[in-house]
Amino acid sequence: MKKNYIFTFMLTLCLIGVSFGQEMLLNGDFETWDDDATPTSWTKAEAVTKSTEAHSGSFSAFRNGGSGTKDLSQTITGIVPGESYTISFWYKVTDGDDKDARIWCTWKNGSATIYHVGDGNDRSSDPLRGPQDGYLDNNGGVWTKYEVTVTAPAAVDAFYFEVRSYSNSLTYFDDLSFVKNATASLKKNSIEGFATYPNPITAKKITISSNSSDVKEVSIFNVIGKRVFSTSFSGLKKNLDVSAINSGIYILTVTETGKTATKKLVIR
């Protein structure tokens, strides 16, 4: 069994260590600005300013309090129905009321809005809206990554990438990304709507979700290939307690109906 764990872990490292796909979002790292309130190439950038408090590089986009819902968005063209895409971004909330930031994306068919799940009224299972109609975890005011892989629905030709911030929040966004996954193996093995957050994990809990209520088999491996955590659950999502795992770098694997998703985890 130990040899199998090591093989699985090394294979996973190979898979996540190779860069798949094509980045389609422009200036997602916010390194280019038309002026201090206008990041280049963004369709909408409400109430944000250029900040040197960056996740990587020199700059991020910062929402410094104020009232109302403010959007940071970009329309991405050239979407191919049936193809797999990975959406990710880093965020940090240093003040607010735990309802401070969201992902709020949709697909487009010309000018028409196409929701990833349903008609937009029931967002409880939509990883692109909230996620799941919730809010991003403030996670103690540290940089945190949200990432999800989805398949483009039929008859879409564009994607509306949007993150939101809310009244009185101090919210940073950086390293936003929208990647078209290039290999058939990724599309075949990816779990529809798979998402995990937060990452890094600082409060000893991680949320795992997908678009399906089918059983999810969850394992976490350490850097020498030893499985240090395993569980299973049914349902769209679940908060898992990983307080028994020491700080460090790990590999998460989730299997659902014969499909497997992997991700590198950082536990602090």
Image (cartoon, rainbow, N blue to C red):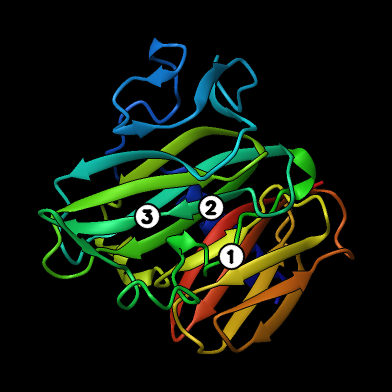
Q: The residue under label 3 is which amino acid type?
A: Cys
Q: Can residue 164 be seen in this view?
A: yes
Q: Mark 2 points at which residue?
A: 102
Reply above or below: 111 against 176.
below
Tag shown at residue 105: 3
Q: Is residue 20 visible?
A: no
Q: What is the quadrant of the N terminus in the image?
A: bottom right
CA–CA distance between discs 3 and 2?
Answer: 10 Å
Tag shown at residue 134: 1
Q: Is mark 3 on a helix, strand or loop?
A: loop
Q: Earlier in the sequence, mark 2 or mark 1?
A: 2
In-image side of 192 versus 254 (left or right): left
Q: Which residue lies furthest to the top in this view?
A: 35
* Disc 1: CA contacts within 10 A as few (<14), some (14-19) or many (>=20): some
In-image side of 94 versus 5 (left or right): right
Picture coordinates of residue 264, whole percent (x, y): 61, 52
Front in this rendered view, residue 225 or 169: 169
In-image side of 144 versus 243 (left or right): left
CA–CA distance between discs 3 and 1?
Answer: 13 Å
Reply above or below: 160 against 49.
below
Quarter where residue 156 is shown: bottom left
Picture coordinates of residue 73, whole percent (x, y): 36, 40
Quarter where residue 23 is shown: top left
Q: Which of marks 3 and 1 is nearer the N terminus?
A: 3
Q: The residue under label 1 is which amino acid type?
A: Gly
User: Mark 2 near mark 1, Cβ–Cβ under 8 Å?
Assistant: yes
Residue drawn at (61%, 28%) of the image = 55
User: Mark 3 near mark 2, Cβ–Cβ under 8 Å?
Assistant: no
Picture coordinates of residue 195, whole percent (x, y): 53, 63
Front in this rendered view, residue 29 or 266: 29
Front in this rendered view, residue 48 or 188: 48
